[in-house]
């Protein structure tokens, strides 16, 4: 079916169900960022393959909403499909909820699949549209009825994340959550987030691409912990382990019946932003719900000393893999043709040679010249660009290891680069150094610090339409909060000791080039004065920054000092894992400037 045919087939079902507008967000029942193929409804109905966006279809209109990371990609992918693109967060652009308010008649019916729509999103939309007397149909997966070759439900097997990696027994983590429940006087805690469940029970899987998790729900009470998951995912060893940690196993679809049987007037702790409305609506009406961040979400954001030690080891291994790849890439320039896709496959090969490697942490971004202007462009076997001639190659990639999750970005010059490209590479480095070298008072949030990175670009009238950094999980999600850097998305979560976060400013110029430099930092204590405890970032990732792409005259003495010190650390930590030829090459790449 063509995209237009899919839209029309959906409209036929909408008419049969008396639905005036149907919403298809990007998501699965657990509000995951990366979602199993089975739940890629929005991609199937629109043809837009980007990682974030929402589709709204009415009887005569079709709209796609996405953010600045995907504007260029979305424009290219929806040509001729009948969709209008709404560029989120730009002045004058309505949100899809506002658009519904302005375009629907009073008493209209809005439909969506409550399994993939969070309760928080539903309540926010309902409030905005309350003046229109809108009716809602929330148990309609209309796409299921027309998607004939829909991929199967993910069925990977669970495995135990051993104590030497996890650092704490599951029962001890569960008791920490129970202590947090006591603070809210809650008898029940419902969890829908897959990373929280995986961390809490020390189990992993492969249901979600690049994220080692199982599709599941969990409920914690004062004396029980229940994992709701398909039985075929749990073998006898995992079942025995869970039972030994005080965890019962029940069927995935049993979660609603269990929740509906919670005693009346019970107090339930949950996070509406990560719990879907399908599950939320099963809660007895007499129960009191407390909408707060899952305790496990905050607990796992501060890595234990064991987790941090393991994570540091993972970054050394990852740095070795990326360094070997960059050496191979440079040696290959004059020998044979390399394209974006074959290069990304070769990078995977180098990572797979590292001890404890499980998978990539996201699909590699390997983007040459104008392709790098699309922040989340990813090559494929059929769609890619040959890497040759003059320009910039942006490489954003990461790995999942048993002892950690990694993410790193470098921009590599090819041939002769322009003065504009050289300036943009230098501005990006200046922005990176400004933030990763920051000293800040304890209690400061990433929202406040974001402008450190943007200032060098703002001073010349430039900006980038995305956040500057994100939290990173521990053998879990590569994007994992609650910490983050963003200038327009308010986040009041303080940066606590041992939180891990990326620092990745960039420059993106449509049809020309893209630049990004990303290292990962861990928050540590710095000096303490009469004014309080100050904090800093300790760098975890070690891959050289190509100085041949820089305009050195734009750097201050302090910035040059930072770069020389960083390169000294890179050589010290990485060189011992390389061949003689690679060591000689890396020594040249990391020489003082």
Image (cartoon, rainbow, N blue to C red):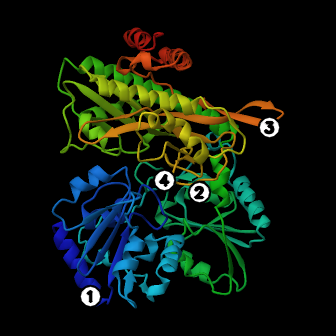
- Could you say whether the residue bearing mark 2 is in a helix, strand or loop? helix
- Could you say whether the residue bearing mark 1 is in a helix, strand or loop? helix
Give the residue at x 29% y 29%: 392
> Which tag is nearer the camera, tag 4 or tag 1?
1
Vertical placement of residue 459 versus 154, above or below? above
User: Whole-Å distance between the Cαs marked 1 and 3?
Assistant: 63 Å
- Could you say whether the residue bearing mark 3 is in a helix, strand or loop? strand
User: Whole-Å distance between the Cαs marked 4 and 2?
Assistant: 13 Å
Label 4 environment density (alpha carbons within 10 Å; few <14, some 14–19, many ≥20): some
Mark 4 or mark 2, earlier in chain: 2
Q: Which residue is disc 1 drawn over?
A: 15
Vertical placement of residue 232 versus 551, above or below? below
Give the residue at x 29% y 75%: 57
User: Whole-Å distance between the Cαs marked 1 and 2?
Assistant: 39 Å
Mark 2 or mark 3, earlier in chain: 2
Give the residue at x 68% y 74%: 268
Q: Which residue is disc 4 drawn over?
A: 205
Q: Give residue 419's quadrant in the image.
A: top left
Mark 1 or mark 3, earlier in chain: 1
Residue 463 lies, in percent from the top left, at 42, 41
Residue 425 lies, in percent from the top left, at 38, 27
């Amino acid at each position: 079916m063509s995209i237009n045919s899919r839209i029309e087939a959906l409209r036929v079902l909408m008419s049969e169900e008396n639905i005036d507008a149907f919403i298809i967000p990007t998501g699965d029942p657990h509000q995951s960022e990366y979602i199993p193929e089975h739940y890629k409804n929005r991609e199937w109905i629109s043809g837009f393959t980007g990682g974030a966006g929402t589709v709204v279809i009415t009887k005569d209109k079709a709209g796609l909403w996405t953010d600045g990371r995907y504007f260029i990609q979305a424009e290219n992918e929806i040509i001729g499909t009948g969709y209008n693109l709404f560029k989120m967060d730009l002045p004058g652009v309505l949100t899809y909820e506002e658009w519904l308010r302005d375009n629907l008649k009073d008493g209209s019916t809005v439909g969506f699949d409550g399994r993939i729509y969070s309760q928080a999103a539903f309540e926010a939309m309902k409030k905005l549209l309350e003046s229109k007397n809108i009716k809602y149909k929330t148990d309609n997966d209309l796409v299921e009825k027309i998607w004939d070759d829909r991929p199967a439900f993910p069925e990977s097997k669970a495995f135990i994340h051993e104590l030497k990696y996890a650092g704490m027994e599951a029962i001890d983590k569960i008791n920490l959550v129970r202590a947090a429940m006591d603070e809210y006087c809650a008898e029940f805690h419902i969890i829908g987030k897959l990373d929280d469940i995986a961390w809490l029970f020390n189990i992993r899987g492969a249901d979600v691409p690049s994220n080692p998790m199982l599709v599941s729900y969990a409920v914690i009470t004062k004396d029980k912990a229940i994992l709701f998951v398909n039985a075929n995912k749990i073998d006898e060893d995992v079942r025995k382990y869970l039972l030994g940690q005080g965890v019962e196993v029940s069927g995935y679809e049993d979660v609603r019946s269990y929740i509906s049987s919670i005693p009346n007037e019970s107090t339930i702790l949950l996070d509406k932003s990560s719990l879907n409305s399908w599950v939320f609506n099963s809660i007895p009406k007499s129960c009191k719900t407390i909408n707060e961040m899952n305790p496990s979400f905050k607990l796992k954001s501060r890595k234990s000393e064991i987790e941090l030690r393991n994570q540091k080891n993972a970054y050394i291994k990852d740095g070795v893999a990326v360094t070997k790849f960059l050496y191979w890439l440079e040696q290959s320039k004059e020998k044979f043709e390399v394209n974006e896709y074959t290069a990304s496959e070769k990078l995977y090969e180098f990572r797979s040679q590292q001890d404890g490697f499980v998978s990539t942490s996201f699909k590699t971004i390997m983007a040459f010249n104008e392709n790098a202007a699309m922040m989340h462009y990813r090559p494929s076997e059929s769609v890619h660009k040959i890497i040759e001639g003059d320009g910039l190659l942006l490489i954003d990639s990461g790995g999942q290891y048993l002892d950690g999750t990694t993410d790193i970005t470098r921009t590599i010059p090819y041939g002769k680069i322009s003065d504009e490209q050289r300036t943009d590479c230098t501005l990006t480095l200046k922005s990176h150094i400004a933030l990763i070298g920051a000293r800040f008072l304890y209690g400061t949030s990433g929202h406040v610090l974001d402008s450190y990175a943007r200032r060098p670009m703002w001073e010349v009238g430039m900006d980038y339409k995305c956040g500057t950094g994100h939290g990173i999980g521990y053998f879990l999600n590569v994007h994992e909060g609650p910490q983050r850097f963003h200038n327009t998305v308010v986040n009041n979560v303080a940066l606590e000791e041992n939180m891990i976060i990326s620092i990745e400013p960039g420059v993106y110029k449509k049809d020309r080039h893209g630049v990004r430099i990303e290292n990962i930092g861990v928050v540590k204590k710095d000096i303490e004065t009469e004014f309080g405890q100050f904090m800093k970032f300790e760098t975890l990732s070690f891959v050289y920054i190509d100085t041949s792409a820089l305009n050195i005259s734009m750097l201050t003495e302090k910035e040059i000092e930072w770069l020389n010190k960083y390169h000294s650390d890179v050589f010290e930590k990485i060189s011992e894992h390389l061949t003689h030829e690679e060591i000689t090459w890396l020594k040249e790449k990391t020489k003082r400037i």
